[in-house]
Amino acid sequence: MSDRREFLKFLAGSPLLLAYPGFLEAFTQAPTGQGAAATLASAADALDVYDFEAMAHRVLPPAHWGYMATGVDGEETLRANPRGFDRYQLRVRRFVDVSRIDMGMELFGQRFTSPVMLCPVGSQRAFHPEGELAVARAAQARGQLQILSTQSSTAIEDVAKARGGSGLWYQLYTTNSWDVTAKLLKRAEAAGCPVVAVTVDLPAGRNTETDQRMARIDTRACASCHGAAGPGGDGRAAGIKPMFTGIDMKGVTLTSATLTWDFVKRVRDVTKMKVVIKGLESADDATLAVSSGADGIIVSNHGGRATETGRPTIDALPEVVQGAGGRIPVLLDGGVRRGTDVFKALALGATAVGIGRPYIWGLSSFGQAGVERVLQILNTELRLAMVGCGTVALKDITARSLIDSRLRM
Ligand SMILES: Cc1cc2nc3c(=O)[nH]c(=O)nc-3n(C[C@H](O)[C@H](O)[C@H](O)COP(=O)(O)O)c2cc1C
């Protein structure tokens, strides 16, 4: 805490302030949640996921906080995601036997403790030395779905092992080289991943202002996540991630601006993994996903880090569910901070509901124990919502469980 105060004092007198007006605001941008004042001695002390947000803000270096917190442009979509859930209210039901609540979720033949899933987040060793391994151990201990990013800072084989074999899904960035993409798919399949989530919401760049502003003020070298042997060798430039080890990366970019729907078929042709498309927000695309042979959809705007639409994912969910027409499962992420948010997404047709930042806050604060506590908190909140609404299993959560405050029905 005092380090931080010292640093702010230093900033106040720094010429950097003149060079980059606005960055102090970005740096001091306090966590927005209710737990902003909390100090945690252990993960068990956290009462909600916001407690971990406040803690993460304290312990993370500015550049790493900026990478996690950033949206794009003016961050309208980032703010819209959590607020979108406020439009809906829960319809309670009484005199239902709620002594046994079953939150179990089944997807593609796998069974999970609850529909809460851990979304792919890159470079997790930037948040805790154990990074993806800590997250995998938490997912394994709690029986939750985890998706590993192409940008993982830990080798996929090690993460799959920590997750206990078949539980880990793989997230694919498509790259601009089919040869490289096919190698990534083969490696994920060989590691035992049953499902690949193909992220399609970043075809050609983005403008992450908070990330850039905070990287500018953070001059430390950080070999633990960038690798001292990375380009420049100073621990600051992004190194080659383990997923690309042994691959010739000359001219290869993470995504491609030329891809069209036939890409889904190409993926299907080279892998037995189920193919889920991550980053859809419209009924038309949902219909195309089905006709292109996708096995599932994740409604996502990359946590407000892709196109600056200003539209929360929860508002996009109903039309995607309609476009999918019950033929393939629809999952959702973006702004989920409470068990009641999970409940609302389920009521609007989601099969599973993902979190990104909340578990990264837990990871940053206490490693595996923090991620586990985040999962426990959300599951407890979801259970209480199910109790209050008299929905004893996930299938009982329907549109009737919600009131749309805009429509009053
Ligand atoms: C720091 C960070 C890194 C991310 N990295 C990836 C990634 O590598 N691949 C991907 O598909 N999505 C990535 N995402 C998006 C998440 O998978 C997810 O869609 C989003 O975080 C959900 O929103 P939430 O953070 O509000 O819960 C990232 C998100 C964050 C915050």
Image (tube, helix red, strand yellow):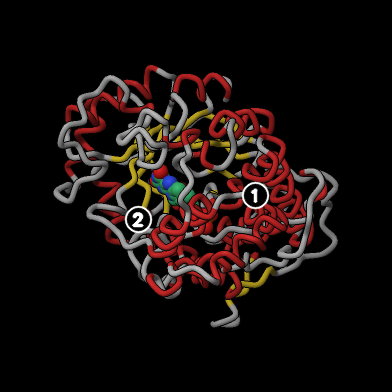
| Picture quarter with the N terminus | bottom right
306 up-or-down from 264: above or below:
below
Q: Residue at x 44, y 41 (%)?
A: 122
- Left or right side of 109 for 104: right
In space, the residues marked 1 and 2 are separated at their CA atoms by 34 Å
Circle count: 2
* Quadrant where the image shows the C terminus: bottom right
Residue 404 in picture, x, y percent from top left: 58, 76
Asked if residue 168 is positioned above or below residue 59 in the image, the reply reads above
- Of badges 1 and 2, the one in the foreground is 1
Identify residue type, mark 1: Val
Q: Quadrant of residue 185?
A: top left
Residue ID at (62%, 64%): 31
Query: Does dot 2 land on a helix, a strand or a loop?
Result: strand
**Residue assigned mark 2:** 280
Query: Disc 1 vs disc 2: Cβ atoms closer than 8 Å?
Result: no
| Label annotation for residue 96 | none
Q: Which residue is mark 1?
A: 59
Element on which disc 1 rests: helix
Q: Is residue 332 visible?
A: no
Is residue 16 shown left or right of residue 165? Answer: left
